[in-house]
Amino acid sequence: MRKGLNMSNLKYNYDKEADTLYISIGEPRPSYCKSIDGEMIYARYDFDTHELTGYTIICFQKYLLSGKTNIPIDFDFHKVLQED
């Protein structure tokens, strides 16, 4: 888990059609992305402060099946599909 990250402030949105999971830390805000794994996982950072604002995971179901839950946050990725 990232030091100083308030886990109670996490929000997420799963776009089933695009199979993309958006995790926001606090309220969503304009951010830029950097790939974490060169493939499916992107960290988002505030344009001005460069503070981590969230993550985007494309091909989310493939990501879950791969077993690579290597985002440094305490988040139950499986609950996203269970709520659907």
Image: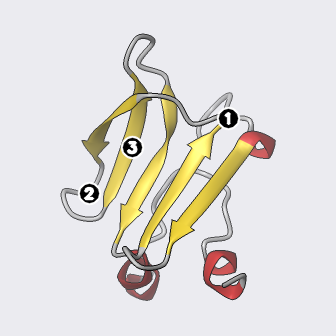
User: Outermost residue, top direction?
Assistant: 48
Residue 15 as seen in the image, left or right of residue 47: right
Q: Secondary structure at mark 1?
A: loop
Callout 1 crowding tier (Cα within 10 Å): few <14, some 14–19, many ≥20 = some
Mark toward the viewer: 1 or 3 = 1
Residue at 34% x, 50% y is 42
Amino acid at the residue labelled 1: Gly
Q: Secondary structure at mark 3?
A: strand
Q: Which mark is residue 43?
A: 3
Q: Which mark is residue 37?
A: 2
Q: CA distance from mark 1 to mark 3?
A: 14 Å
> x, y (%) of residue 31?
39, 30
Amino acid at the residue labelled 3: Ala
Q: Which mark is residue 26?
A: 1
Q: Which mark is residue 69?
A: none
> x, y (%) of residue 35?
25, 48
Q: CA distance from mark 2 to mark 3?
A: 10 Å
**Marks 2 and 3, the one that precedes in the sequence:** 2
Residue at 63% x, 80% y is 78
Residue 28 as seen in the image, left or right of residue 40: right
Q: Is 75 drawn above or below residue 59 in the view shown?
A: above
> x, y (%) of residue 54?
51, 42
* Nearer the observer, 44 or 71: 44
Q: CA distance from mark 1 to mark 2?
A: 23 Å
Can residue 1 be seen here? The reply is: no
